[in-house]
Image (cartoon, rainbow, N blue to C red):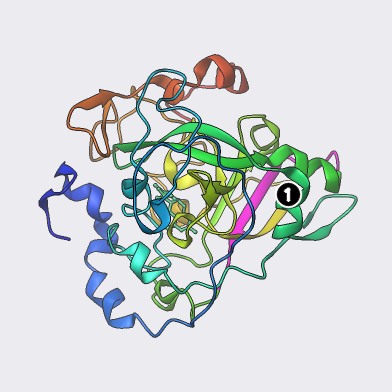
Amino acid sequence: MGEGENLMGKIHSHEITPEHIYFSRRKFIAGMGALVAGTILSSACRPQKITPEGTGFCAGAAASASTDELGAKLTPCNDVINYNNFYEFSFDKEDVGDAAKNFKTSPWTVTVGGMVNKPRTFDIDELVRRFSPEERIYRMRCVEAWSMVIPWLGFPLGKLLKEVEPQSRAKYVRFETLYNPEQMPGQKIDLLAWPYVEGLRLDEAMYNLTILSTGLYGKPLPAQNGAPVRLVLPWKYGFKNIKSIVKIDLVEEMPVSTWAVAQPQEYGFYANVNPEVDHPRWSQASERRIGELARAKTLMLNGYGNEVAQLYTGMDLTKFY
Ligand code: MTE
């Protein structure tokens, strides 16, 4: 994908590739090895009413409404699955789906441990059966100033964390993506500190809006969107929404995330969507909604301020960005 126009309208160079990665892109492409063939997870989810037309994954895509609660239109299914950030597979957003098509996501387990009374390894199919993922239509605002509105299927992360009984010393939750360079060719290149790591404060993780997603548009997650299980929390920039999680640890110290290692001045731990705090290289006041022509104003905490602002009472959000 080059700079300039694409089928979804005007794009800015920063939307394509962060600068430090851009210069190493050829190295990345050179390192793309063969992918291990595998099967795609097919756990059951309950579609509701059929909305958009589509082919392939998007045939029979289902959502219960055509907008979110604030009236923003759902991003068409085809855009949700064809414009992705998943650097383990490709740095080209429109290439991720193809690069991830043989990613083996079954069987899959998530190990939850650290400062908990009952550490445990969960089978993802068992979690899906037990926790019955439900639809949550959330906005996702990427730090690169584009956004989508996505009907996720998921269950509150807090439900899972309660089962392992966090100890009182635990203050943060640390998440890790699968490390498997044979399947994820991007991990053969040293541009990011693999595996991808993200973190939340424990109260953010326990908050009801924070979900582990296992599907979208009424179907199990496609590989490019983080199959079989990824984090989704709508008031933070998209990079917090770590994909293909295999490990969750309750910890005392603030986890250091992959992006904070790469560029600490650009990717803060909190990463709360904030139109008043610009990115060092561009404004965060507005966003390009994928699939639409007009730009939208970015809302404080991505429009979820009524619910989550109280998590940050007394904190200077320009300092804790
Ligand atoms: N998780 C992993 N493991 N690797 C990644 O490269 N990219 C992040 C996040 N989760 C990423 C990840 C970024 S930058 C964004 S914007 C969202 O995933 C994109 O999610 P989507 O492709 O489902 O829209």
Q: Does the residue labelled 1 lie within 8 Å of ligand 1?
A: no
Q: Where is residue 235 in the image (x, y as percent from the top left)?
A: 49, 30
User: Looking at the rendering, which quadrant does residue 189 occupy?
Assistant: bottom left
* Position above or below: 68 against 140: above
| Residue most extreme to the right | 117
Q: Is residue 170 visible?
A: no
Q: How many labels does the image show?
A: 1
Q: Quadrant of residue 165?
A: top right
Q: Is residue 114 visible?
A: yes
Residue 61 in the image: x percent, y percent? 44, 45
Q: Nearer the viewer, residue 179 or 67?
A: 67
Q: In the rendered view of the protein, which quadrant contains the C terminus?
A: top left
Q: Which of 314 and 247 is in front in this view?
A: 247
Q: Is residue 51 magenta?
A: no
Q: Give me the residue at 85% from left, 57% from top.
A: 119
Q: Relative to 294, does residue 309 appear above or below in the rendering? A: above
Q: Which quarter of the rendering shows the N terminus?
A: bottom left
- In the rendered structure, which segment of residues is drawn in magenta? 167-179
Judge whether 251 appears above or below 279 on screen. Answer: below
For the residue labelled by badge 1, is the local secondary structure a helix, a strand or a loop? strand
Looking at this rendering, what residue extends furthest in the left direction? 4
Q: In this view, does 251 lie to the left or right of 27?
A: right
Other-residue count near label 1 (Cα within 10 Å), few / some / many at <14 / 14–19 / ≥20:
many
The residue labelled by disc 1 is: 251
Q: Which of 44 and 305 is in front in this view?
A: 44
Residue 90 position within the rendered picture, expressed as x and y whole percent measured from the top left: 34, 66
Left or right: 190 in relation to 108: left
Residue type at the position of mark 1: Val
